[in-house]
Image: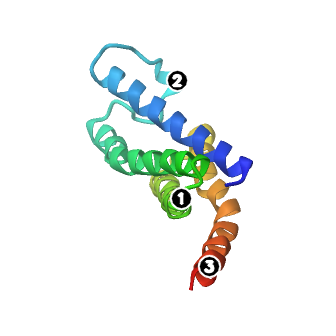
Amino acid sequence: MSTSLKWALTATDIAFLIYWSVALLECLGLISIPSEWLYAHAHDPRVVAWNWSFFPLDIAFSITGLWAVRAARRQDPIWRPMALISLILTIVAGGMACGYWLLLGEVDALWFSMNAILVVWPLLFLPGLVREMAVNSASAN
């Protein structure tokens, strides 16, 4: 695994685990986040439900991404499929969020750009990873 892929997966996955930890603390009333830091309509029950609907997807890409990094350190070939799954789920999560805000016509530059980055950065690694997986698969046969 390249250093840049390892860094990108680790940074994204840890950031999302922190995001969901903070969201949980805020949901439980243990912390208060200033409204200007939140996305539009952050306290509307439907928007809260929409946000929490991403929880399983975000946790899945975080776990598979961190698993891939750990497996790569141990030189376990399972890192490639785990990284592939993580990258695809990251694109899906970012794309869904961008689609939501575009459909509403409420594009806050900060929130939209953060989600757009989730769509774009994995695309930088996918072709090389898929090519590498194909080469490894062909050499195994």
Tell me the mark number nearer the camera, choosing from 2 and 3. 3
Residue identifier under label 3: 134
Residue 65: percent from left, percent from top: 51, 49
Q: Is residue 20 visible?
A: yes
Query: Quick one: 2 or 141, which is closer to the camera?
Result: 141
At label 3, the amino acid type is Ala
SS class of the residue under badge 3?
Answer: helix
At mark 2, the secondary structure is: helix
In the image, is residue 100 above or below residue 136? above
Instruction: Read off the residue under disc 1.
Output: 91
Spot occupied by residue 109 in the image (x, y as percentages of width and height): 63, 41
Q: In the figure, is residue 126 to the left or right of 22?
A: right
Q: Which of marks 3 and 1 is nearer the N terminus?
A: 1
Residue 30 in picture, x, y percent from top left: 32, 13
Q: Which amino acid does label 1 sit on?
A: Ile
- Count residues near mark 1 (Cα–Cα under 10 Å), then give few for <14, some for 14-19, many for 20+: many
Q: Residue 99's x, y, as percent?
A: 49, 58
C-alpha distance separating marks 2 and 1: 26 Å
